[in-house]
Image (tube, grey):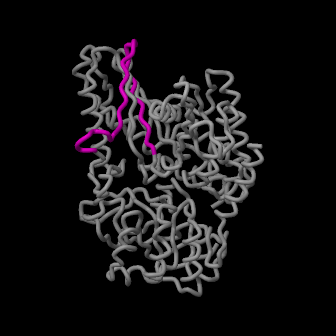
Amino acid sequence: MSECVVPTLTSAEVVASKSLLPQGWKADMSNLAGLDLTLCATELLRRTTSRLPQDVIDALVKGRDAEEPGSRAFNTLNDMVRNIILADGNVSPLCQDTGSIIFWVRHPFGFSQRAARKQLRAAVMDATKRSWLRPNCVESLSGKNSGTNMDPFHEHHPAIHFEEWDLPHIEVSVMQKGGGSENVGAQYRLPDAALGAGRDIKGVRKCIIDAVVKAQGQGCSPGILGVSIGGDRVTGWERAKELVLRKLGTANPDPKMDVFEKELTQDLNTLGIGPMGYGGATTVLGVSAEEMYRHPASFYVSIAYMCWSSRRGTLTLAADGQPSYDL
Amino acid sequence: MIRLTTPITEEAIRQLKVGDEVLLNGNVVLSRDMGHKFMKEQKPEWLKPILENMVIYHCGPVVRKNADGTWTFVAAGPTTSIREEPYQADVIETYKVRGVIGKGGMGKKTSEGLQKTGAVYLHATGGAGSLLAERVKRVVDVKMLEEFGSPEAFWIIEVEDFPLVVTMDSHGGSLHEIVAQQSQDRAKALMA
């Protein structure tokens, strides 16, 4: 299983040829209130469930090529690449845990959030019927599976965040957040006496190292970390998760944070946890950190851990209604 | 590379050591959170002939029902095993299970169970859902589908050359314990 696999995915043309959208489909942006996102959102899910973003693939390949050929770490990363090629070619889920589905929708004035919520729910239901998503929504106490991925009463799954903006186009981002990686996320409150972590950047760094060591391979390492510094218990977590959407290898707009992220990524990769916790030099693929404001009494560090199979993507409906997909 | 076919004898399992690479063939039984709680608390008799000398796989697959009523596994990688830590050793002993497939490894209690009964923990690559589904030859049967829902049901599948690594053996060895210890030591140095 050790020959080095080259990660050649199907071309953009082939992906487009399998699209659910009829050729030449455009959204009618002159009627924002009457817009139907169902089909273009189902198409987004088809792509995110079966195709990893290029920056994630590049990071996995870079990690593999830095491991010793034939080592368990090398072979495991190589199998990950193999899996990426297969899922893409078959249009089948990369991972059986197709995750909790989280949407971020940014839209101009006049767009109906109520209608969009119904349409995104319909898209998730349709993708579930097509076996692109596993039914991952169960009643907490009984464990009973709704079978449709819908939270039937409270509408918390899929999770949808809306924001109205001052731009003419619409953006729909989605993340498929696996349960194993979600379970190893962590929120710290500084100061933390047990860690010896104070209310400064050194303290933040200690929290992140601690979270990664506690996670070991459980969150399907190499992981991608979204870290928010500050906020409250809810806004901190929300932001941390959203930070996982940032492309790997893009610079943090805050130069101080950019240096922090790069140094921390290097340090974390000396922990020796490696892919799937087998040991090795590839423990994380990247860290995305952001400083927020906070209440003077509270200092939270919220760490969202994303598995190596970081399924995310964005659908843009341009001002003229032209759809485009960015994974 | 060691080829094993279920059912497996205790003698064959006792020969395996941490680090051994295994290609598994034959039937395996899927079970995760609901199944393990159910097995520990209710100890159903009907599962005994299904599980004796067999291998449990911690997995909640994506499945497709075909027009002829049969099932196909679309994606079938391992789920995190540590959640079954409170149940696993009892399940292994009650049902004489010879192997557990999962990801992330398990703890002391399970390790003791592996040593006592004669079983191993086999690690599969997490997230490799498509790759591993290709090694599923057929779905043999499914139990408790209505009650548990498809991710939690007892799927019985036949696998062919299913690629695994022994990360916990029946002699107390655990790769997870070694990696955890080393990374904790390194973390201390980084935090100093």
In the rendered image, the vertical position of residue A157 relative to residue A95, given as above or below: above
The residue nearer to you, when weighing A296 against A326, is: A296
Residue B111 in sight: yes
The residue nearer to you, when weighing A230 against B57, is: A230
Label total for image: 0
Residue located at (65% from left, 43% from top): A193
Residue B143: x and y, percent? 30, 71
Q: Tell whether A32 sits left or right of B163.
A: left
The residue nearer to you, when weighing A159 against A200, is: A200
Residue A78 in sight: no
Q: Quadrant of residue B175?
A: bottom right
Residue B162: x and y, percent? 52, 68
Magenta segment: does it hold A176?
Answer: yes
Residue B45: x and y, percent? 33, 83
Q: Tell whether A283 sits left or right of A40.
A: right
Residue located at (23% from left, 44% from top): A152
Q: Quadrant of residue A49?
A: top left
In the rendered image, the vertical position of residue A271 relative to residue A192, given as above or below: below
Magenta segment: does it hold A71?
Answer: no
In the rendered image, the vertical position of residue A212 relative to residue B170, given as above or below: above
In the rendered image, the vertical position of residue A238 relative to residue B106, given as above or below: above
Residue stretch rendered in magenta on the structure:
A151-177
The residue nearer to you, when weighing A16 against A259, is: A259
Q: Tell whether A189 sits left or right of A24.
A: right
Residue located at (62% from left, 37% from top): A191
